[in-house]
Amino acid sequence: MKFINKDNSIFFSTLRTRVNQYFTENNISRYGNREMVIKSVVLISLYLAAYICILTLPWAAYLLIPFALIMGIAKSGIGMTVMHDALHGSYSKNKVVNKLMGNSIYLLGANANVWKIQHNLHHHTYTNIHGKDEDINTKVVIRLSKHAPRKAFHAYQHLYVWFLYGLMTLLMFSNDFYKLLRYHKAGEFKGKRASIDREYLNLIGLKLVYVFFMLILPVLVTSLLWWQVLIGFLIMHLTAGFILSTIFQMAHIVEGTDQPLPNAEGNMENEWAIHQLNTTANFARDNRVLNWFIGGLNYQIEHHLFPNICHVHYRKISEIVEETAAEFQLPYNVKPTFSDAIFSHIKALKQLGTYPA
């Protein structure tokens, strides 16, 4: 599949020049800064502090639920802020730092190599393209692509989907196993020094370490019963999964975002950058607190156009992106507030559940 430049557009080259000029003129790095470091310390410390409290406080049984909720909230923040930028290589210009901070994905119970193929390669290259972008694959009872088969119960998905969004990180924990094999068979691990056997050993080993610290150690060192620990574990994952799923869906499954298909020759109608504008939306750009917590994912347009730029710069460069898009008469989809984005997502889910392929 190729993205063709049908109208010989110079949109992206113009935009890239202007964004580069912004960093040059202001003498700032496109990577993370002090804000990024502070944010990382706060979120990781919050996660670890809640976990240590569960292990050490004598009344942990009574506070398991609030501490599990705190861990879930911090876990989602780490995923959207620390891990996300690091695995895109935009946290730092130092590859070692990116790898170290990217390893925070193991706090979510997921795998870095699998995530990079699914997210960096499939989602960012083939955004909202049915059969290519795994983020819009139909999840049994959730229809996220207008080109997927529709079932009668999908008509109600805008009502029940919220109860399923929480399963995201739990599914990531289990799905990594078959995705690793599928990506290897597709040749997407080609060029990596590690063999598939070593990848599987690493995958299994890290999953076992995660299970030990999350489920076994609390039973061994506290008075908590196994079922109490399991409840806390599920609360943590359901909280993180719900937040992550909701934020990610509001970027691509909202009104005004397209889901184009390649033509008979296997080519997309627009160039890649214009495709990103057509398939992505921003939301709540003026909400500084939300922007801080979700790692700038309310500036998804900027993130998709410049995934190698740290999210702390998106608010500033969004002005350049919006002005350039308007100059070239291209869409720039923005939902003014968080609630506007939620309601737009609900309407999009209802549409997807109502209309056939």
Image: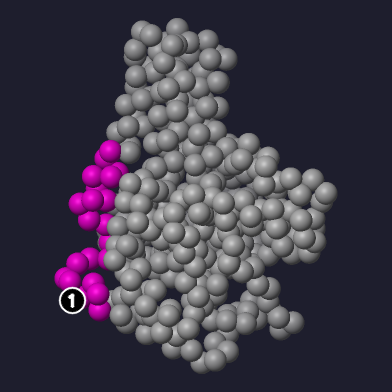
Q: Is residue 42 above or below residue 219?
A: below
The residue at the point 69 percent across, 53 percent down is: 350
Residue 115 visible, this orientation: no
Q: Where is 266 relative to 40, above or below?
A: below
- Viewport quadrant of the N terminus: bottom right
Which of 253/201 is in front? 253
Residue 176 picture quarter? top right
The kind of secondary structure the magenta stretch mainly shows is helix
The residue that label 1 is drawn on is 25
| Horizontal and vertical percent position of residue 159 | 67, 42
SS for tag 1? helix
- Residue displayed at 49% across by 30% down: 236
Query: Is residue 329 found left or right of 177 in the rendered image?
Result: left
Q: Over which residues does the magenta segment extend? A: 21-42
**In magenta segment, residue 36:** yes
In this view, which residue lies farthest toward the right?
Answer: 152
Q: Amino acid at mark 1?
A: Glu
Between 180 and 8, the one nearer to me in the picture = 8
Q: Is residue 147 above or below residue 106?
A: below
**Which class describes the residues within 10 Å of circle 1: few (<14), some (14-19), or many (20+)?**
few
Residue 29 horizontal side relative to residue 162, left or right: left
Residue at the (50%, 63%) spot, across then down: 281
Left or right, residue 351 beside residue 62: right
Residue 297 in which image quadrant: bottom left
Q: Please identify the quadrant where the C terminus is shown.
A: bottom right
Point 51% across, 54% down: residue: 341
Q: Position of residue 270 (x, y in %)?
A: 57, 81
Left or right: residue 11 versus residue 158 is: left
